[in-house]
Image (tube, grey):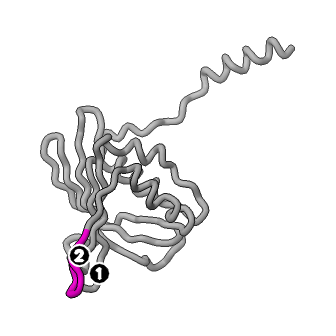
Amino acid sequence: MKRILLPLLLQAAAYLPLAAQPSYAQQDELLSTLYSVISGEAGEARDWGTFRELFLPEARLAPSRAATDSTKGSYRVLSPEDYIRTSGKWLEENGFFEKEIHRSTQEYGSIAHVFSTYESYRSASGKEPFARGINSIQLFHDGERWWILSIFWMGETAAHPIPKEYLPD
């Protein structure tokens, strides 16, 4: 009986539909995946495999900070792997949800520039964001799908509020 059952189960499994894989043919699919894959409750593992699939091999992420009266502006350049290594544990331990609240896109041929305004929460049920800012995202289309080439971002500060043209109406 076991000899018959195993081949039948394997044959039946071959006909099960595979889970739909994102094609990233649309910018919205790529960007919504970006926001969802870094978001999660405290203690919830992130899908870093999917995160990696969003980026070109040479991609860079660069958090920045505006200059103040007492400090120079600064930035740090990371690969996607550097981001996972430096931020992954913190995201998973503390809970973090980044929600896009406005998007402005310019596109020409195979390139696109997206100004994506975000709010950050500690939980999906959070009522007030603990941070806001703008992600400047550069995309490349290879003829089949969109890829992230870079993300350069800055958090909002009292000295640098988000301009109203980058906020929801």
Question: How dense is the environment of label 1, judged by Cα within 10 Å: few (below 14), some, or many (20 and up)?
Answer: few
Q: Position of residue 134 (x, y in %)?
A: 28, 67
Which residues lie in the magenta part? 66-74
Residue type highlighted by circle 2: Ala
Of marks 2 and 1, the one in the foreground: 2
Q: CA distance from mark 2 to mark 1?
A: 9 Å
- Give the label on residue 157, or none: 1
State whether residue 101 appears in this view: yes
Q: Nearer the viewer, residue 36 or 49?
A: 49
Question: Against 49, is 4 above or below?
Answer: above
* Quarter of the image that includes the C terminus: bottom left
Please provide percent x and percent y for residue 103: 26, 61
For the point 18% across and 45% down, the residue is: 111
Q: Determine crowd level at label 2: few under 14, some 14-19, many 20+ residues with C-alpha closer than 10 A.
A: some
Q: From what the image shows, is residue 136 above or below residue 48?
A: below
Residue at the spot 58% in from the left edge and 66% down from the top edge: 42
Q: Nearer the viewer, residue 90 or 14?
A: 90
Q: Is residue 103 visible?
A: no
What secondary structure is the magenta-colored segment mainly?
loop
Does label 2 or label 1 sit earlier along the sequence?
2
The quarter of the rendered structure image containing the N terminus is: top right
Q: Which mark is residue 137?
A: none
Query: Which residue in the protein does label 2 denote?
Result: 66
